[in-house]
Image (tube, rainbow, N blue to C red):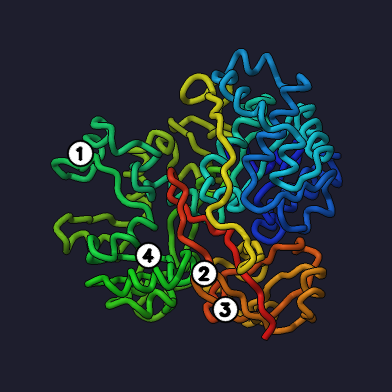
Amino acid sequence: MTNSISEIERAEVILVTGSNTTEMHPVIAGYVKRAVRQGGAKLLVVDPRKIELVAYAEIWLNPKPGTDIAWINGMIHVILKEGLEDRAYIQDRTEGLDKLQEVVRDYSPKKVESITGIPAQDLQRAARIYAKAKAASILYAMGITQHTSGTDNVKALANLAMLCGNVGIPNAGVNPLRGQNNVQGACDMGGLPNVFSGYQPVGEEAVREKMARAWGVKSLSGNPGLTLMEMMEGAKGKIKGMFILGENPMLSDPDLHHVEEALGKLDFLVVQDIFLTETGKLAHVVLPGVSFAEKDGTFTNTERRVQRVRRAVAPPGKARQDWEIICDLSTRMGLPMGYKGPEEIMEEIRSVTPSYAGITYQRIERTGLQWPCPTLDHPGTPFLHKDRFTRGRGLFHPVQYRSAPELPDAEFPFYLSTGRILYHYHGASMSRRSQGLVERAPRCEVEISPRDAQRMGLKEGSMVRVCSRRGQIQAVARITDKAVEGTVFVPFHYAEAAANLLTHANLDPVSKIPGYKVCAVRVEPI
């Protein structure tokens, strides 16, 4: 997040898109609700589903799945045409607006309506509300990123925010809501194929030399590694072994038949986890790690806050600390790792990571610090890009709408979107072992609109078959106004009705993220 969670309550306007916030991020949703109820903020919700936050919204824009760039460019078109942009901010802090203007000129409200289904007058009204705010916050999640145009979707939102001067000021910003408790921290620590910790590029020689000295090796490769989906492709021949830590791709990756085939061709598969997951069942070796409640260390949350996590209970059986397992593996493979504990590891992190340099266990004993925190006397950074951007001026990136690679047709007439529900968490390896949560959400339900259900003769609780070009599942029909006509939603938590048997593996060309949120299916009564 460019800004802090607490700032959401002080925003004048909040634009939520691609985020079912009340179910996926219920704590942050509380800030949004309070901003509306107590602070008088205006809430704009853009989502193909009628999520709970729509009840708090000034306006709900309901686009066809996969058309985000069109409606964002359409809002920019309206703002520029009506002269609502922040001209002083654009002049002082940005560049490239002329190229953006050329592109958005073609996105009139009427044209956007023909692409997205959003009524032209609703788009215009939303654009005016956003542009006229002194501080407007954009919140988004995987409903924006999990598309074949995910990178361009985020660039388009950044264009919108900069156009109205909403980056680098309090109570505003472009704020991705991270899907799990340490996603931000994993990325910060170099859990990406092209960077070391703190987003230091592997291609920069000075960075590689610094990291090599810290790790006691002669040199490090400047070649980026592979993304998750590229690894799966490589597993069909180039990659012979894989080590999977705390991840269950046999439930969470797209096109699961493809994933199972890839993992099955490995010479050696190791899975380190706290339960025997669907992926663990395919492994040659399973290493028992520990849960969040059984470890010491740090998490970095969605607002870049580095926080201590402390062991509450002892690990069961032969489970071991994740860092100990990794150190032993590294030592046996030829690179000795003799860390005494998590604090020593943290000291190394801050010694080689400028944005973490001022963060010590002592400083975060009670309250976390937000990076960048470059020195020991630095207070942390509540919001990013104050006064200037990292690159100097903020650059507008013109992006064009392109349709999703798979759209509904006569054979597969529904849009399918996948995601999470309140009572289960990601691969559900923990939540589906909790009796209370299982009682609340015991089985996979397919959300279908009342009109679609009536047309197919379905009743609440009917069993249905959902089919795509890649596979099929059976689930229970849930008839609800949350689903818009022509769309269905399936949660991906249930191995016995795995939604990702249906999804395709088409990727964003830049981030390589799969397009989970748009594919074509048909629904058949059983």
Mark 2 vs mark 4, foreground winner is 2
Q: Are marks 1 and 4 in contact (CB under 8 Å)?
A: no
Give the amino acid type for the residue marked by disc 1 in the picture.
Arg
Mark 2 vs mark 3, foreground winner is 2
Element carrying mark 4: strand
Give the amino acid type for the residue marked by disc 4 in the picture.
Leu
Q: Give residue 358's position: percent from left, percent from top.
A: 43, 35
Mark 1 vs mark 2, foreground winner is 2
- Label 1 and label 4: CA atoms lie apart by 27 Å
Mark 1 vs mark 3, foreground winner is 3
Q: Which mark is residue 245?
A: 4
Q: Which mark is residue 469?
A: 2
Element carrying mark 1: helix
- Given residues 34 and 359, the one toward you in this image is 34
- In the image, residue 36 sits, relative to residue 103, either above or below, namely below
Element carrying mark 2: loop
Q: Give residue 232's position: percent from left, percent from top.
A: 35, 62
Tell me the residue that label 1 is attached to: 213
Note whether residue 171 is visible.
no
- In the image, residue 465 sits, relative to residue 400, either above or below, namely below
- Label 1 and label 2: CA atoms lie apart by 51 Å
Q: Give residue 397's position: percent from left, percent from top.
A: 54, 29
- Label 2 and label 3: CA atoms lie apart by 12 Å
Give the amino acid type for the residue marked by disc 2 in the picture.
Arg
In this rendering, would 257 be left or right of 465?
left
| Between discs 1 and 4, the one toward the N terminus | 1
- Label 2 and label 4: CA atoms lie apart by 30 Å
- Given residues 384 and 418, the one toward you in this image is 418
Tell me the residue that label 3 is attached to: 473
